[in-house]
Image (cartoon, rainbow, N blue to C red):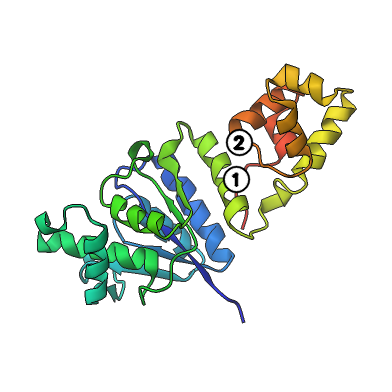
């Protein structure tokens, strides 16, 4: 019997189109890998995740503040008093919120802690402007951070290319997923083989790339995953492309 895990896919209404497309692809990929989507049915990032999940009729829990919110037909409607208690604990100005906004905040309790409010999500993927803890998404992020739940915020990155690469690193560090096409599988060996084929010592590669020798050693021994910026520097120093050195950037289910 397949054991489903869960993740939370949420974010701002004004998420860029390129990030929305990425979220939809990611949601399909995660659904194929037996992850249940937890989200909130709002326009923007929430809807992008749900569209991706729906492509393969994946499992989802779409928590709504009231029935019919944003034209959703989800039956996960906030009703438990505990959801409001949790929301109050994490909101900095709870007493100033209207009853309607309190319902919106209470649904975030379920997005992170599940239907029973006792089952934390495995990780959060989201978008907020500039990666800041702002807007309605901030409530969910405050809960996630307090529970030490890994969070990937696409708003931290300036381009969609960097966002994709950093998300892959996030998955490698925080899940047991075997990523598409062997991406990053034995990446250290590939780096070392390409370096030695060009008859470069670690010192020489470091001098050409601006990456420290100790760091290169850790990469080649698979002790550390390089960031997108460092991967680009190493590829350039080896006179190759990012794709040839590190693999395809396509999401595959």
The picture places residue 83, in percent across and down from the top left corner, at: 26, 70
Q: Is residue 40 visible?
A: yes
Q: Which mark is residue 169?
A: 1
Q: Is residue 43 visible?
A: no
Q: Is residue 87 above or below residue 171?
A: below
> What residue is rendered at 78% in x and 46% in y?
186
Q: Quadrant of residue 227?
A: top right
Local packing at callout 2 (Cα closer than 10 Å; few below 14, some 14-19, many 20+) is few
Q: Is residue 201 above or below residue 218?
A: above
Closer-to-camera residue (170/202): 202
Q: Which residue is mark 2?
A: 227
Closer-to-camera residue (236/145): 145
The picture places residue 205, in percent across and down from the top left corner, at: 78, 22
The answer for how far apart the CA atoms under marks 2 and 1 are is 8 Å
Closer-to-camera residue (156/67): 156
Q: How many marks?
A: 2
Left or right? Give the position of 43 relative to 31.
Answer: left
Quadrant containing the N terminus is bottom right
């Amino acid at each position: 019997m397949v054991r489903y895990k869960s993740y939370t896919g949420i974010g701002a209404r004004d998420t860029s189109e390129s990030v929305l497309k990425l979220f939809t692809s990611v949601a399909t990929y995660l659904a194929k890998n037996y992850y249940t989507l937890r989200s909130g049915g709002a326009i923007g990032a929430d809807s992008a995740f749900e569209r991706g999940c729906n492509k393969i009729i994946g499992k989802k829990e779409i928590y709504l503040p009231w029935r019919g919110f944003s034209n959703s037909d989800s039956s996960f409607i906030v009703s438990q008093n505990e959801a409001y208690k949790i929301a109050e604990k994490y909101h900095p100005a709870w007493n100033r919120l209207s009853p309607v906004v309190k319902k919106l905040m209470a649904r975030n309790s379920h997005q992170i802690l599940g239907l029973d409010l006792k089952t934390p999500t495995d990780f959060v993927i989201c978008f907020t402007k500039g990666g800041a803890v702002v807007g309605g998404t901030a409530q969910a992020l405050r809960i996630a951070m307090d529970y030490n739940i890994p969070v990937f915020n696409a708003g931290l990155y300036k381009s969609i290319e960097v966002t994709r690469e950093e998300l892959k690193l996030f998955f490698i560090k925080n899940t047991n997923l075997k990523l598409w096409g062997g991406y990053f599988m034995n990446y250290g060996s590939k780096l070392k083989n390409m370096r030695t084929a060009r008859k470069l010592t670690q010192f020489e590669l470091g001098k050409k790339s601006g990456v420290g020798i100790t760091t290169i050693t850790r990469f080649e021994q698979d002790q550390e995953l390089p960031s997108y910026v460092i991967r680009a520097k190493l590829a350039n120093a080896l006179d190759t492309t990012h794709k040839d050195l590190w693999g395809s950037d396509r999401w595959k289910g």
